[in-house]
Image (cartoon, coloured by chain):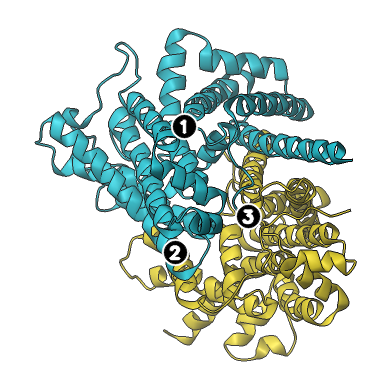
Amino acid sequence: MSGGIAPARAREVALLGFGAVALTLGAGGLLLLAGGYDPGAAGAAMLRGSVGSWNTFVSITLVRSVPLLFAGLAVALAFRAGVWNIGAEGQLYAGAIAGVWVALTFDGFPTLILIPAMLAMSCVAGAAWALIPTLMRLRLGIGEVITTILMNFVGIYTAAWMVHGPLQEERGIFPQTDRIVEAARLPSFIPGTRLHLGFALGLVIAIGLAVLFRRTRFGFQIRAVGASPEAAAVAGRIEPSRVIFITFLASGAIAGLAGAVEVSGLTYALYENLSEGWGYTAIAVALLAGLRPGGVVVTAIFFGSLRAGAGAMQRDAGIPSAWVDVVEALVILGVLGLERVRAARIVTDIREGDS
Amino acid sequence: MSQVELVLFLESAVRLGIPLALAAMGETLTERSGVINIGLEGSIIAGALGGALGALAFEGAGLGIIAGAMAGLFVALIFAVFAISLGADQIITGTAVTIGGLGMTGAIYQAQFGATGTELSLPTLAPVAIPGLSEIPIVGTAFFAQAPTAYLAYVMAPIAWYVIFRTAWGLELRATGEAPAAAEAAGVRVRRVRFVATLFGGAMAGIAGAHLALAHAGTFAENMSAGKGFIAIAVVVLGRWNPVLVLFAALFFGAASALQFFLQALGFDIAYQIFLALPYVLTLAALAGWVGTSRAPAALALPWEPHR
């Protein structure tokens, strides 16, 4: 299954990305027109709601892009190794549950201990959520696509159970946990805005992954296994199962962080339906970025602005917010389609060059 | 458990298993051709909305089922154009189609009926008791006093089995999924076979969705497919790509889901959310425990580039 989405050069990725976004906006506009809406008003509302002012951009768009940044990096890492982790959604909930549990249980500890403990525990939980599909793939040969998706539902319902049961707020009325103490809350990143330090942490992980892919032996092994596990084993003396094991769990850990960071940085409590499908949007984020960590930063902000703009679109232009999901699907299909057209052209060029 | 409760349990097991059976049977043919359609979930939700709107427009649940099949087929067509004609990655295409299907149905529903979600009541597909069979004690009403879509599933299982294993087209289908290069050398149009099998799978998933809306819920709700497309794909694996076994695997999961309502009704004090997670956990457990020896079609999920 691997190889179909091999990362290309940065310039090609950018061209492809802009092409896909342009196609999507065109198709999305036509769909809106067909649905009887005014695409111009929709676009204006979207821009106003996402990049209308500095404060809108930082406090709404960037804040919304934080979970997409973590989940997108998790997906990009896994896909690079040919691991089809569609389970970021469930891993994210596992991380959020673990993080909020630490914050509620050890609420007397100082920030410098509490926050790192929350983040570490969310990594462990996310990795544990990925462990079952990992073992099922490596030990039993069962593809991870279905197993990770099934684990998503288990994660969502586990979180729902937590906020109705063991971790429900003190009065037992609302489906949410108690609010976490001040010491468990991530400080602000840009003072005067709602943007928290989680965004910076995401950037650090993006840089770390970029270095990993380019500069390290293990990064090379990930790419080799992603291109072809057999070839990597034969020619590179790489043990694919070891690389897959580590990469899959690391991907789960990063997705787990997304959940804890959201709770610690923004919501200060665990709610049912914390995520608006970030784990799935992350696939679009990673693909549009050509699976490049640096690109993920850009595309996470792009999808963050779509999500931010969708709210304004619904308020000001009366357009259902579910349109954003349609746009996401169109972006993925646009990338896939353009990628295939490009590949076909290269093949044709080579064939014509032969004759 | 009293006899009345047992009958109720079996009846809801069958009712919950039928949409899985319909979708998984279509997916069985699709996967036999070498295509894994993760976009099945998108076809199911489109079938549910298509069925709902169709039933309202034509003022009848029967025509709603046909509208649902068309909607599911349309979603599969989008998948097929990208994953088969363009040869794009099947997993990612399928994921996009699912996201798009859930989003599009949500947007259409919100636009038609408002974002607040006023309860929509639909013409329902009434159960039809089969004379004779439905009078068998206990299992009779459970299996043979169901909506007509259930009988479609019962009838489709042996027919699909016959088509796959006993007809010339079935041989071409299996060859396409196992060894597309050899199939092409023998004159089989690999992409065409895959296209047909995928559209069939989409139509079946659409019927499954329409069943959810018209025979089960009597209404449409956003995301009401609730992962049934993914469970259906797991059911195909559990049924070892054999339509008859797939029917039984689907009924087993229907029973797992029915258990949730049932144990609750019996007053077991277990949180409702744990029951909701149960079918997914059981699917994982069954995959881990039972699949060991079975094998997917060799060319599953591999795009095919015709050689001219």
Q: Colour of chain B?
A: yellow
The residue carrying pointer 3 sits among few (fewer than 14), some (14 to 19) or many (20 or more) residues within 10 Å by Cα, namely many
Residue identifier under label 2:
A138
Q: CA distance from mark 3 to mark 2?
A: 21 Å
Q: Which residue carries the number 3 mark?
A: B38
Q: Is residue A239 left or right of residue A47?
A: left
The vertical placement of A119 against B57, above or below, is above
Q: Amino acid at mark 2?
A: Leu
Q: Which residue is mark 1?
A: A293
Q: CA distance from mark 1 to mark 3?
A: 26 Å
Residue B202 in the image: above or below residue B222: below
Q: Residues within 10 Å of mark 1 (few under 14, many from 20)?
A: many
Q: Which chain is cyan?
A: A
Pick the residue in front: A68 or A77: A77
Tell whether B68 sits left or right of A266.
right
Tell me which chain the residue with mark 1 is part of.
A
Give coordinates of residue A259: x percent, y percent. Answer: 35, 39
